[in-house]
Image (cartoon, rainbow, N blue to C red):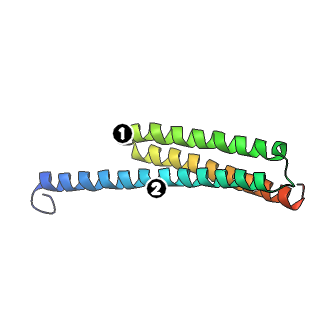
Amino acid sequence: MGLFGDDERQDQRLDALESHIRELTETVHRNQVDTAACWADLLGLQAQVDQKISASDVDPALTNLNEDLREARKVLDQSAKTASESWANFQQGVNQALQSLRKSMSEAATRVQEKSTGIDA
């Protein structure tokens, strides 16, 4: 017997809560990707403004970052379709894609900062 004495009603509430949590999680993931895209744009603008950095120094980092952004968006789109089938696998895949994106973002920011200060790694 369910919490409310009505298993069907309890199942409906649980399904509604799970659906809501999935939607919130997908929104958070999309916001993380959009934030990384904004950072990539800012890094590109910083590189253009800073006279010390040549485009050839920054382009590889930004190109890699844009590739990671495309991949993260692709994973988010695919995972949204399969989320109801396997929530745990969905979360693991998205978390890995976002972790890779954060790493690329950090590497690109470090590269731009090093080039703007004249420090070569």
Residue with the mark numbered 1: 85
Image spot of residue 94 (x, y percent): 51, 47
Residue at image position (83%, 42%) is 56
Residue at image position (39%, 42%) is 83
Q: Look at the image and tell me in which quarter the N terminus lies.
A: bottom left
Local crowd size for mark 2, using a 10 Å CA cut-off: few (<14), some (14–19), many (≥20): few
Please state which of residues 65 and 17 is positioned toward the viewer in this rendering. 65
Residue at image position (42%, 50%) is 26
Image spot of residue 106 (x, y percent): 70, 56
Badge nearest the viewer, 2 or 1: 2
Q: Secondary structure at mark 2?
A: helix
Relative horizontal placement of residue 6, taking residue 27 as reference (left or right): left
- Alpha-carbon distance for marks 2 and 1? 20 Å
Local crowd size for mark 1, using a 10 Å CA cut-off: few (<14), some (14–19), many (≥20): few
Q: Is residue 93 above or below residue 45?
A: above
Image spot of residue 68 (x, y percent): 63, 42
Residue with the mark numbered 2: 28
Residue at image position (77%, 41%) is 60
Q: Secondary structure at mark 1?
A: loop
Relative horizontal placement of residue 18, taking residue 78 as reference (left or right): left
